[in-house]
Amino acid sequence: MKNKKAISISELGIEGAELLSVIHKEAFYGEYEQKWEAQDFIELFSIPGTVSYLISFDGQPIGFILIRSIEDEAEIITFCILPKWFRNGYASYLLEWVINTLQKQSVKRLFLEVRENNDAAIKLYQKCSFKIIGRRKGYYKGHHGEITDALVMQIQL
């Protein structure tokens, strides 16, 4: 990873909906049938316990994670790093930071869903101690009508 001193993580709420939409579209370009618009993020932020954390390098946004917490459990709604920043350790850095932050907030379990064929993401989650606990058949639909199962993963914090 490049200079850790140049990395910052900040909380973003509804005011960041447009930026989150732009990052999400670029990060998942071509993967999903439905793109998340700013309005989708605004609606997510209207749900209590929803927060996002933006990771930046030298002030330039490079990705984010969107989480919903309820009592002592949390779920990663979406998580992305811009493609030009892939494989530099930023996803690990952000995920580990979020895990530590949630532990301090007394969250006991963190869940997520991931495409069963997203090997890079699955490796990242397993590196951070997530375990596969289930499968959701036909959860994701792609541009060309392909259907992919989701793996449900969790980590005990």
Image: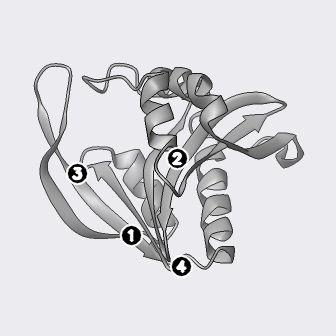
Q: Residue furthest right?
A: 5
Q: Secondary structure at mark 4?
A: loop
Q: Quadrant of residue 140?
A: top left
Q: Tell me, for residue 49, which label it has, or none.
A: none
Residue under pointer 3: 150
Labels 4, 2: front one: 2
Q: Is residue 73 above or below residue 14?
A: below
Which amino acid, by three-letter code, is at mark 1? Gln
Which x, y percent locates residue 30?
Answer: 33, 19
**Spatial CA span between label 3 and label 4:** 22 Å
Classify mark 1: residues with Cα within 10 Å, few (<14), some (14-19) or many (20+): many
Q: Which numbered disc covers residue 157?
A: 4
Residue at 59%, 40% (x, y): give it: 64
Tell me which label, 4 or 2, sits earlier in the chain: 2
Q: Nearer the viewer, mark 2 or mark 3?
A: 2
- Measure the C-alpha gap from mark 2 to mark 3: 18 Å
Label 3 Cα crowd, 10 Å radius (few <14 / some 14-19 / many 20+) = many
Tell me the residue that label 2 is attached to.
Answer: 66
Q: Are marks 4 and 1 in contact (CB under 8 Å)?
A: no
Q: Element type at marker 3? A: strand
Q: Whole-percent x and y of residue 120? A: 41, 46
Find out whether the residues at labels 2 and 3 contact each other: C-beta distance under 8 Å.
no
Residues tagged 3 and 1 counted as in contact (Cβ below 8 A)? no
Q: Mark 3 vs mark 4: which is more N-terminal?
A: 3
Which residue: 58% across, 22% down?
18
Instruction: Quadrant for residue 111, please give it.
Output: bottom left
